Amino acid sequence: ANNLVAIVGRPNVGKSTLFNRLTKSRQAIVSDEAGTTRDRQYGKCEWNGREFSVVDTGGWVVNSDDIFEEEIRKQVIIATEEAGLVLFLVDVTNGVTDLDVDVAKILRRSKLPVILVANKADNNVHQYYAAEFYSLGLGEPYCVSAATGSGTGDLLDIVLDKL
Ligand code: GDP
Ligand code: MG
């Protein structure tokens, strides 16, 4: 089986923050500025004595919105070609965006196992808003806070289950 887990999602949802937490590194650059992650970043994650690889997908720094979104789609497609499991990150503080819907479509078509991860669920109020991501058609949104680490242990249990 392919034990590469790809973290995908539109810019600024916290992919690099989650990557760094899972790999216990500061390899991936975290930034408020959308599109800071260049190319793709690979790392290893160990949980309950098992190891798997993680890839943080990014997109190049391009300041034209159109080219930028095209680049994100490309990154998602590349990720789905090499991954065995996808963590699809969305941002509960932002709600569903058009780009989330686009990425969801690519992922549904890929037939890969996908865990829908509602990030930035720093507190219970945010968890309440996660329900709207059901509309993406990828099952139950799983709440985490990559920043605080809340929910990431349970997420890792699910990842190991699905790998
Ligand atoms: P990426 O573009 O998807 O890789 O997103 P980044 O990891 O670079 O994060 C974008 C911004 O969101 C940064 O300012 C992070 O500090 C912030 N962020 C990431 N995860 C969380 C979280 O769980 N809660 C909150 N409140 N902010 C977060
Ligand atoms: Mg990033």
Image (spheres, grey):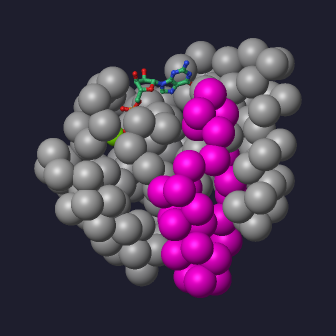
Residue closest to the eye, 149 or 53: 149
Residue closest to the eye, 97 or 41: 97
Tell me the residue at 56%/82% (across/down).
Answer: 110
Left or right: 69 as drawn, with respect to 134: left
Residue 144 to residue 98: above or below: above
Left or right: 118 as drawn, with respect to 39: right
Residue 62 to residue 124: above or below: below
Tell me the residue at 68%/54% (across/down).
Answer: 116
- Residue 43 seen in the figure: yes
Query: x, y (%) of residue 92?
Result: 66, 33
Query: x, y (%) of residue 118?
Result: 67, 40
Left or right: 140 as drawn, with respect to 51: right
Residue closest to the eye, 22 or 57: 57
Q: Quadrant of the N terminus?
A: bottom right
- In magenta stretch: residue 6: no
Query: x, y (%) of residue 126?
Result: 75, 24
Query: x, y (%) of residue 121?
Result: 69, 26
Tell me the residue at 46%/74% (across/down).
Answer: 80
Residue 34: name its quadrant. Answer: top left
Tell me the residue at 26%/60% (across/down).
Answer: 66
Dividing the image into four quarters, tell me where ligand 2 lies. Answer: top left
- Residue 26 seen in the figure: no
Q: How many marks?
A: 0
Q: Quadrant of the C terminus?
A: bottom right
- In magenta stretch: residue 100: yes
For the record, the magenta segment spans: 91-117
Residue closest to the eye, 73 or 24: 73
